[in-house]
Image: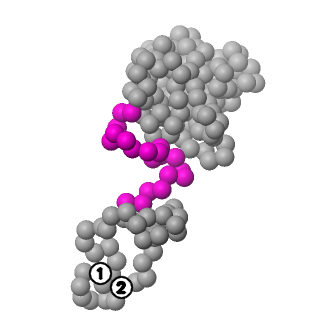
Amino acid sequence: MSAAAELTAAWHGRYGDDVTSEETSGGLAVGVPAETWLDALAFARDDLECGFFDWLTGVDELEDGFAVVAHVYSLERRHHLLVRTRVPREAPALPTATGIYRGAAWHERETYEMFGVVFEGHPDLKPLLLPDGFEGHPLRKEFVLAARVAKPWPGAKEPGESGGGAPSRRRVRPPGVPDDWGPHA
């Protein structure tokens, strides 16, 4: 039996039909309900010997909410495991995993800042990477990435803008920028 098949059997033996599983190129990805997030991570660490916490992040799945994904690894058995869950778009929250994997603290702060997922019980859930006073969550799909609209790009960005040569093309707003946004709205 392959490592992925053994892991799949272990997950379904523990959680039954509450989990989904899928083989990946490096191991196994399992989906768990948000209510069992901490129990699933403890199961991975204690029963499946995944003592190495690698990373945790979010994925914006639009109307489906946010997926929160943790990658853990077993040094003893040499298998990779992705544990994922989904939280709703309105008031996204999960309990913190720092009691199970201390290394999750930084990753949860980053996911909180970039996606707005609150990790309840986190010992120091505060902004990590963005400047003070920054508003919004830049990895959400509705976040407007409009640096070229707010501040002119230094140098030519379209043919003909450098003062000679070909005529300029019609200026187009960067993708995702609403028509009513920016200094020239």
Q: Is residue 12 something that shows in the picture?
A: yes
Residue drawn at (33%, 81%) of the image: 159
Residue drawn at (58%, 17%) of the image: 38
Query: Nearest the camera: 2 or 25?
Result: 25
Query: Nearest the camera: 132 or 82?
Result: 132
Residue named by callout 2: 168
Q: Are marks 2 and 1 in contact (CB under 8 Å)?
A: yes
Quadrant of the frame with the N terminus: top right
How packed mark 2 is, by other alpha carbons closer than 10 Å (few <14, some 14-19, many 20 or more), is: some
Residue named by callout 1: 161
The amino acid sitting under disc 1 is Glu
Up-down: is 13 above or below 116? above
- Secondary structure at badge 2 equals loop
Where residue 4 sits: x, y (%)? Answer: 59, 26
Query: Nearest the camera: 143 or 29?
Result: 143
Give the side of residue 119 with respect to residue 103, left or right: right
- Secondary structure at badge 1 equals loop
Residue drawn at (44%, 36%) of the image: 113
Q: Is residue 29 something that shows in the picture?
A: no
Of the numbered discs 2 and 1, the one sitting upstream in the chain is: 1
How packed mark 1 is, by other alpha carbons closer than 10 Å (few <14, some 14-19, many 20 or more), is: some
Q: Which residues are magenta?
A: 127-147
Residue found farthest to the top: 46
